[in-house]
Image (cartoon, rainbow, N blue to C red):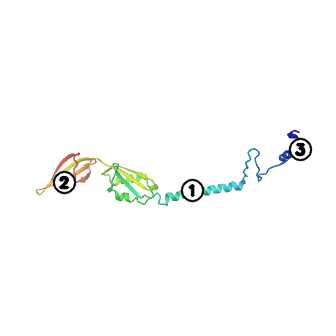
Amino acid sequence: MAEHDNPRRKFHLQRLKERTFNSSTVHMSRRRGVRERPSFGVIGIVTKRILLGVAVLAVIIGGIYLVSFSSFFTIKTVRVLQDDVPIEQPIFQPLSDAYLGKNLIFITPASLEREIIQQFPQMIATAEVHKRYPGTLVVSFTNFPLEFNVLTESEKDGQVTQKKVVINSEGFVMEEDMEYPGLASMKVSIEE
């Protein structure tokens, strides 16, 4: 007797052919033995989209809080470099101290650079401001080069007074009562 002639087998094959599956029926795949996923329908899809939207909104609100209101990006230190060398007491310390406690993300380096150069045009040639996250502001500047040692002599009522100054390339007095041996020297006599 051949296998396809078996009445019991014919009966089961006939039942399988007649069986219809609806969307709520979970059945086994004949080939792999894996259960098929039930479809969610319209309500399930809408629920998924709502939950996804709420999750995205929560991430956006959390990001705005982190950037705007938390102390994570608050400026805690201001490092000042003159010719790439750290200095302790820069002349614009009050200006840099004004930025302590502000949010680093909302600081625009270009405006701070302009502000430094505008307040000290006689001595600062270039200023660069960099943000070092999460809470450091780095200000780097270079002075105009020093050009001359100038010795001024003035005579008043028979008394001679001497004063030493150092002048930069812009013609401004940078230091008083100092002399740099590597610079050109100039002597100016003032008669009164």
Disc 2 crowd rating (10 Å Cα; few below 14, some 14-19, many 20+) is few
**SS under mark 1:** helix
Q: Nearer the viewer, mark 3 or mark 2?
A: 3
Secondary element under disc 3, as helix, strand or loop, is: helix
Q: Residue pushed farthest left?
A: 158
Residue 185, labelled with which disc?
none
Side (left or right) of 188 relative to 54: left
Q: In this figure, which residue is indicated by the disc labeled 2?
A: 163
Q: Residues within 10 Å of mark 3 (few under 14, many from 20)?
A: few
Of the residues shown, which amino acid type is indicated by label 3? Pro
Q: Residue furthest top?
A: 2
- Residue 187 horizontal/vertical position (percent): 17, 48
For mark 3, what is the residue?
A: 7
Kindly identify the amino acid type of the residue bearing the numbered disc 1.
Answer: Val
The number of discs equals 3
Query: Cβ–Cβ below 8 Å for labels 1 and 2?
Result: no
Label 1 Cα neighbours within 10 Å, binned few <14 / some 14-19 / many ≥20: few
Identify the residue shown where x is 23% and y is 47%: 148
Q: CA distance from mark 1 to mark 3?
A: 64 Å
Is residue 35 or residue 86 the one in the foreground? 35
Disc 1: which residue: 59
Q: Position of residue 48 (x, y in %)?
A: 66, 55
Residue type, label 2:
Lys
